[in-house]
Image: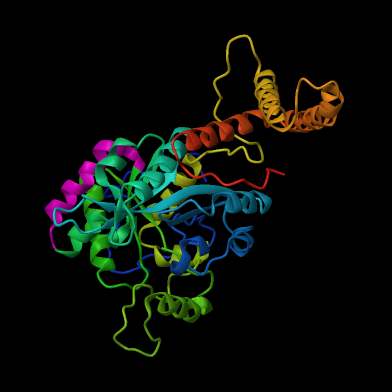
Amino acid sequence: MSATQPKDASLDTLSLASGAGAAPASATREFVHLSVHTEFSLVDSTVRIKPLAKQVAGSMPAIAVTDRANLFALVKFYRAALASGIKPLIGVDLRVVGALPDGEITRVILLVQDDAGYLNLTRLVSRSFQEGQGGGEPVVELDWVLEANAGLIALSGGIDGDVGHLLRRGRAEDALAAARRWQGAFGDRYYLELTRCGRPDEESCLNGACAIAMETGLGVVATNDVRFLAAADFPVHEARLCIASGNVLADPKRPRHVTEQQYLKSPAEMAVLFADLPVALDNAVEIARRCNVTLKLGKPVLPDFPIPDGLTENEYFYALAREGLEERLEQLYDTAAASFAETRKPYDERLQRELDVIAGMGFPGYFLIVADFIGWSRENGVPVGPGRGSG
């Protein structure tokens, strides 16, 4: 494949056929899944990280994990992907409010392109939990996402995104305006997401999205909205959903939001499914190429604690600890007694040993930070337990 894949939709590259399979598919066409929920989406998926990495290895060059409103899987996924020789793509499936005038919650998938995008995504996720609770789950305001777009690639959310919602309602002009709003913030980092999972209105939304792509020059990308690894896992996933919702499997009226097609399909299966829209497959690989973040794991990252001029972090830490020892010894013993020097000797030796261990591990800053908020709590009447040490 060439170094750069087609991104923009055009009349030459888009086919608006009403169904898949309009043209022969290449069994060797590459594909990367960009919408995958895992066990860290709690009741929404049965995909486990290590089996996911194992299944992808050898068939796809990369994989994205885009759990619902969280990055809980990040470290485990990142390590498992690298160990399996595949490129880990970091993302989140966010719920969005403010995209539709009626206040309905929509979705958008954000993928991390670079370090700035990683920081923006972590801030958005944190803000969704702290400020954006809605409908019993974390949500983000549309304006938050548009403002914090740097370093992020956005997928439209398919039939559940704002563009998809409007297309399903027959509001093509409003859908076009919504797409242009995203394009205004993200530029060529916004893609119209296409799915064929057997859900109602998918094909009409796909055709509407392709029409918008031709009007705006936006790229289209195929996903499979993955919720389980193999087709045979569908009944287990349904049982899990019923446990979460309190429904009964045999109930014909229970809500069904997932189909048996939402498994981790192979590149060959996706090539057949989108044989009439090969550009949507190629763009999935191109997006994977555009996402490049290296995480530094295993090293503590702490803020710099303010140290008085003329002292190093270790010196200040040692000084504070010795001041604390002096205060406690004055409470316990007669410091004017002739025997006091001998009495305090074991305490001094023990403190020195403890301080040297902490300094040797590079943790003085950590202890200073903890001591700071413990001290503030005591001064402001916040109860503080005796603790169990940090060993």
Residue 6: % across, % down = 39, 44
Image coordinates for residue 57, horizontal then vertical, percent: 63, 58
Q: Is residue 6 visible?
A: no
**In this image, 273 relative to 141: left or right?**
right
Vertical side of 15 occupied by 5: above or below: above
x then y, percent, for residue 70: 44, 53
Residue 187 is inside the magenta segment:
yes
Quick check: can you spot residue 299?
yes
Q: Position of residue 384 (x, y in %)?
A: 53, 44
Write the residue at 38% across / 80% down: 246
Q: Which image quadrant is residue 207 in?
A: bottom left
Query: Can residue 11 be found in the magenta stretch?
Result: no
Residue sitting farthest toward the top: 310
Quarter-of-image position of residue 261: bottom left
Which stretch appears magenta?
Answer: 170-189
Residue drawn where x is 64% and y is 61% of the image: 54
User: Residue at horizontal 77%, vertical 20%?
Assistant: 336
Decide which of 41, 280 is in the foreground and name it: 41
Side of 377 relative to 345 (left or right): left
In the rendered picture of this protein, how many numbered marks are placed on residues? Answer: 0
Viewer-nearest residue: 144 or 190 = 144
Q: Taking 231 as reference, is 306 above or below it?
A: above
Helix, strand or loop: magenta stretch: helix
